[in-house]
Image (cartoon, helix red, strand yellow):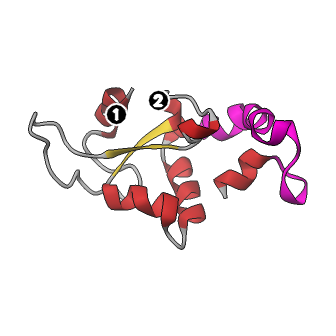
Amino acid sequence: MSVRSLKEANSICEACGEAAPFLKADGEPFLDMHHVLPLAAEGPDTIDNAAACYPNCHRLVHHGAEAASARLRLVDNVTRLKDFRAARAEQVMAVQDGGKVGGEGRCQAHNALE
């Protein structure tokens, strides 16, 4: 899956548009794989759930002060990820909290993506 995502990204970070920071020993560009719905939350390891990111951008979408908006921008900017939010929202809701609705009357998927 990661090879396919990297090829589709064309060695460019899908979050910021910068080129991969360096080449690995095998000559392949080094980019992290960001899973929009984390594997730990039973997210699929598929191309529609993975974006190639510069290491700093990958840390930003997880740990940055503006992580929520960075995640939303990434999903909005990578065409193959757009279906992820709509098509998987109910699946995410069923997986997290036993299908209970999250804060402010929204499912956990919407809360996680913001």
Residue at (10% x, 33% y) in the render: 26
Sort mark 2 into few (<14), some (14-19) or many (20+) by Cα contacts within 10 Å.
some
Label disc, if present, on residue 8 of the rendered structure: 1
Q: Relative to 44, is 33 above or below?
A: below
Q: Nearer the viewer, mark 2 or mark 1?
A: 2
Q: Relative to 102, is 40 above or below?
A: above
Indicate left or right for 7 with 44 as reference: left
Quadrant for residue 4, please give it: top left
Mark 1: secondary structure: helix
Question: What secondary structure predominates along the stretch shown in magenta?
Answer: helix
How many numbered callouts?
A: 2
Residue at numbered disc 2: 47
x and y, in percent, of residue 94 in the image: 80, 33
* Closer to us: 2 or 84: 2
Amino acid identity at mark 2: Ile
Q: Which residues are magenta?
A: 82-107
Taking the magenta stretch, the answer to whether it contains residue 98 is yes
x and y, in percent, of residue 48 in the image: 52, 32
Amino acid identity at mark 1: Glu
x and y, in percent, of residue 11 in the image: 25, 43
Residue at (49% x, 59% y) in the render: 61
**Do labels 2 and 1 touch, CB within 8 Å?**
yes
Looking at the rendered image, the quarter that the C terminus falls into is: bottom right
Quadrant for residue 39, please give it: top right
Quadrant for residue 85, please give it: top right
Mark 2: secondary structure: helix
